[in-house]
Image (cartoon, helix red, strand yellow):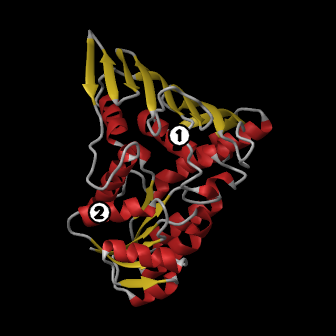
Amino acid sequence: MKGALIGCGFFAQNQMHAWRDLEGVEIVALCDRDVKRLSETAEAFGVGRTYTDAEEMLASEDLDFVDIATTVQSHRPLVEAAARAGVHVICQKPFAETMEDARAMVAAVHGAGRVLMVHENFRWQSAVRSAIQAVRNGAIGTPFFGRISFRSGYDVYSGQPYLAEGERFIIEDLGIHILDIARALFGDATRITATTTRINQAIRGEDVATMLLEHEQGVTSVVDCSYATRRTRETFPETILEIDGEKGTLRLDAGYSMTIERDGSHVEDVSPPLLPWAEKPWHNIQESVLLIQKHFLECVTRGEEPETSGQDNLRTLALVEAAYRSAKEHRTVELSEI
């Protein structure tokens, strides 16, 4: 399959490494309005054709898919342009600025008969994936409570300075991942209650959020996120899990140690591999990029719906919108309102 990458920024370099590692696929063209960034990425990965205009690239190239790795404001026009060009789409999160945009993008690609996948990679981190599979396989019986936690003081603004500029920050950028993990573990939620605060006064948005979810299957989950937590041992970028089931408990602790308590204790090291192009502590996220892109290729080949399809991601986006509404209005929000 022949693909093109739109957006050659900080995180997109991971996507390029992963595409290069996968068999049966080649990135044949790149697009970015920043000429310097575009030329540097093309040189680093040996891509011969570059564009500063996505419409021109879509008209000129014979592509099977595009990988959209731009900021959220550009997603709708780019996804709709890809749909008009008749190519499959994998698009970076957050998928859309509004639910209206998200629904329009899903409809456009569906109408073109193509696959649309959202690059929602946290549930594809191998350690988190091990926990998800254990729960789905009944390792602790039917779950009734879960806590999904991401707390760190890591300076994420140095590599991605735009994160400090938006009125929305941690729920939209990080919480969306953690909420998606909650959905992967426990199914869809019916209501959410959220609180937010800003500790770092140098940024515009919130950097701490705590959310309480009630799920359709009867599970209660707590999702908490912080970029203002100071720890002696920095756990970035690990997600910590604690899940109670009717027959046991599961914990994913710092250091990628997964413990299942059921008629005794079983401890498993679920550390992600350090890929040749990866570096710690980012390696768990970098590996997840490879895994999610592999899933995308498999779905395109088989004509199947991706696990993190555009349609599926609408429900994660709805949780984000409901969380912000809850925090603003100081009340529990029903997902049916969104």
Q: Nearer the viewer, residue 97 or 163?
A: 163
Can you see residue 304?
Answer: no
Q: Are circles 2 and 1 on residues that touch, CB within 8 Å?
A: no
- Return the x and y of residue 283 as percentages of the image width and height: 35, 46
Q: Amino acid at mark 1?
A: Leu
* Residue, disc 2: 297
Q: For this view, does 207 lie left or right of residue 238?
A: right
Residue 82: give x, y in percent of width and height: 47, 76
- Nearer to the camera, 291 or 118: 291
Q: Earlier in the sequence, mark 2 or mark 1?
A: 1
Is 288 displayed left or right of 337 in the figure?
left
Quadrant in which residue 274 is drawn: top left
Q: Which residue reaches farthest left?
A: 23
Question: Would you say residue 288 is visible in this rendering?
Answer: yes
Q: Residue shown at 64%/61% (left/top)?
A: 100
The quarter of the rendered structure image containing the N terminus is: bottom left
Q: Check disc 1 and report the residue beneath it.
A: 179
Q: Residues within 10 Å of mark 1 (few under 14, many from 20)?
A: many
Identity of the residue drawn at 58% across and 74% down: 77
**Residue 204 x/y as whole percent:** 73, 49
Expressed as whole percent of the image width and height from the top left, the position of residue 259 reads 32, 21
- Label 2 environment density (alpha carbons within 10 Å; few <14, some 14–19, many ≥20): many
Identify the image quadrant of residue 201.
top right
Residue 150 position (above or below residue 308): above
